């Protein structure tokens, strides 16, 4: 086929090159036929052996681009789209969850965790922006160092000590354009095609996308209420020799679970014993609604520099400012800097200078106290209204922090049918399936977030939800059946 370009003089294996060619053609809808060429004919036309084509086809199937029928061949997988139910792809779902892809104007948005504009600290940040311009003039618009504006790295180093009891030198901090860029940079640095990585199951779908883009072999480990299944982690660490474990210590997304101190200690021990890094992704530790329950990070306990700590301020500051950071182990410093350079050279110097001033003036502390009061009230309303639905067999673990509730549904309710009906009734929810690595464990959950809605919308939205989930528990005369 003349569409393919394979170069035998480079290090990239031929089957990977063939996979990448097919991937592009499928994504851009450039293949005229749904059926791929036979293995033998394609191998002959490209001058490669059959194993090369077989390996490329297997990788395409694993990544969800094709499916095979024994005795018939390999076919392009078409995404299901119907007039009755607008199909929302996983990538689109992640954009919606992040507040980038808007839901219908008339919808009550239980999908997004992004804060509403009325919570943005506009006046304080405006003062910081103006003061930076007055102070620095045109200097504010120069490129900062590739690892970030040095005074901001100093402020973040101090922030880590004051808020998490964590000591990290300013020169081990890399400023990023949000948490997702941090994940992309780490993926570029640590993952070679075929490397095994471990993740919590379920987990943040944006991280899964970043890891898949680098060709990682992703192994999911079930989450318990006090953290990841440690016994299974021990087994997988021995069996797979993973590059790293990706996890969220506090108010994990989507489960809202937080790790016990015992499990945190075991994670650190296993990381050291088996020689894998731990990527600790944090964006909600600050949002505890119990002043007597101060959450600690895994990084604060790290004595061997095995934890790469990613912090995003988007969900509790202003999403559009796109400020985050990574802490860098010395062994990976040069490689991570290279990956950052190929990503965007540097993040906005002007915004870095303004955010530095914002932190130095102490605005952050007052902002956190304000949003904790607001979100705590929303959380109490949501849990109060959800508790009224116990008769329908729903359940959840009370996180007492964070921005969402992980709701377990009874087997009588199909999560995708529920998603469809909620959409039709102008209620945006997130079906739990999008967060699971695979369907090997129970996935009949939905995530309900209260970050992007007001108090009245919480009550109204849960009434809509009740009307929908009550249907399996009513008889023909609209009387409620006892839940068994």
Image: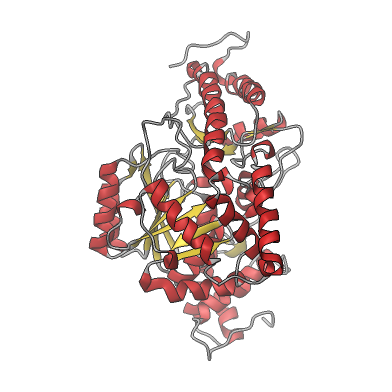
Q: Does residue 266 appear in this view?
A: yes
Q: Give the image location of residue 106, x and y in percent.
A: 76, 32
Q: How many marks?
A: 0
Q: Give the image location of residue 298, x and y in percent.
A: 34, 51
Q: Is 444 situated left or right of 137 in this image?
A: left
> Residue at left 58%, top 19%?
470
Q: Is 441 situated left or right of 9 in this image?
A: left
Q: Is 352 situated left or right of 51 in this image?
A: right
User: Which of the pair 257/37 is nearer the observer?
Assistant: 257
Q: Give the image location of residue 477, x and y in percent.
A: 63, 8
* Identity of the residue furthest to the front in this view: 135
> Residue at left 36%, top 36%?
225
* Quadrant of the rendered image containing residue 417: top right
Q: What is the quadrant of the N terminus in the image?
A: bottom right
> Residue at left 51%, top 26%?
412
> Residue at left 28%, top 62%?
304
Q: Is 36 situated left or right of 158 in this image?
A: right
């Amino acid at each position: 086929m003349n569409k393919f370009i394979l170069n035998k003089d480079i290090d990239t294996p031929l089957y990977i090159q063939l996979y990448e060619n097919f991937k592009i053609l499928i994504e851009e809808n450039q293949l005229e036929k749904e059926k791929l060429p036979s293995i033998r004919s394609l191998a002959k036309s490209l001058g490669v052996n059959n194993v090369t084509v077989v390996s490329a086809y297997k990788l395409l199937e694993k990544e969800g681009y094709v499916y095979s029928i024994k005795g018939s061949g390999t076919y392009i997988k078409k995404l299901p789209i119907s007039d009755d139910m607008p199909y929302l792809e996983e990538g689109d779902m992640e954009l919606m969850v992040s507040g980038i892809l808007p839901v219908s104007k008339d919808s009550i948005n239980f999908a997004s965790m992004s804060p509403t504009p009325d919570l943005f600290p506009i006046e304080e940040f405006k003062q910081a922006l103006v003061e930076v311009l007055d102070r620095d003039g045109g200097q504010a618009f120069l490129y900062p160092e590739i690892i970030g504006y040095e005074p901001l790295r100093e402020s973040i180093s101090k922030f880590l000590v004051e808020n998490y009891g964590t000591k990290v030198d300013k020169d081990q901090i890399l400023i990023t354009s949000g948490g997702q860029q941090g994940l992309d940079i780490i993926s570029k640095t640590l993952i070679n095609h075929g490397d095994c990585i471990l993740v919590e199951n379920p987990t943040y779908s944006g991280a899964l996308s970043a890891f898949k883009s680098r060709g990682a072999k992703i192994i999911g480990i079930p989450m318990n209420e006090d953290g990841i299944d440690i016994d299974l982690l021990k087994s997988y660490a021995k069996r797979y020799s993973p590059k790293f474990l990706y996890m969220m210590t506090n108010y994990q997304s989507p489960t809202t679970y937080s790790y016990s101190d015992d499990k945190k200690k075991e994670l650190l021990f296993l990381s050291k014993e088996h020689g894998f890094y731990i990527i600790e992704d944090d964006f909600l530790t600050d949002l505890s609604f119990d002043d007597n329950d101060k959450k600690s990070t895994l990084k604060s306990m790290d004595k061997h520099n095995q934890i790469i700590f990613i912090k995003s301020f988007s969900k509790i500051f202003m999403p559009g400012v796109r400020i985050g950071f990574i802490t860098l182990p010395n062994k990976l410093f040069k490689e991570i800097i290279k990956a950052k350079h190929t990503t965007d050279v540097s993040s906005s110097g002007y915004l870095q200078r303004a955010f530095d001033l914002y932190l130095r003036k102490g605005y952050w502390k007052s902002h956190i106290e304000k949003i904790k009061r607001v979100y705590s009230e929303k959380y109490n309303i949501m849990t109060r209204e959800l508790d009224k639905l116990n008769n329908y067999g729903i359940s959840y673990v009370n996180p007492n922090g964070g921005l969402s509730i992980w709701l377990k549904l009874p087997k009588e309710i199909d999560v995708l049918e529920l998603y469809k009906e909620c959409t039709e009734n102008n209620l945006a929810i997130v079906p739990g399936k999008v967060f699971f690595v695979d369907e090997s464990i129970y996935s009949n959950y939905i995530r309900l977030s209260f970050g992007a809605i007001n108090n009245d919308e919480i009550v109204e939205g849960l009434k809509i939800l009740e009307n929908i989930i009550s249907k399996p528990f009513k008889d023909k005369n609209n009387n409620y059946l006892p839940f068994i």
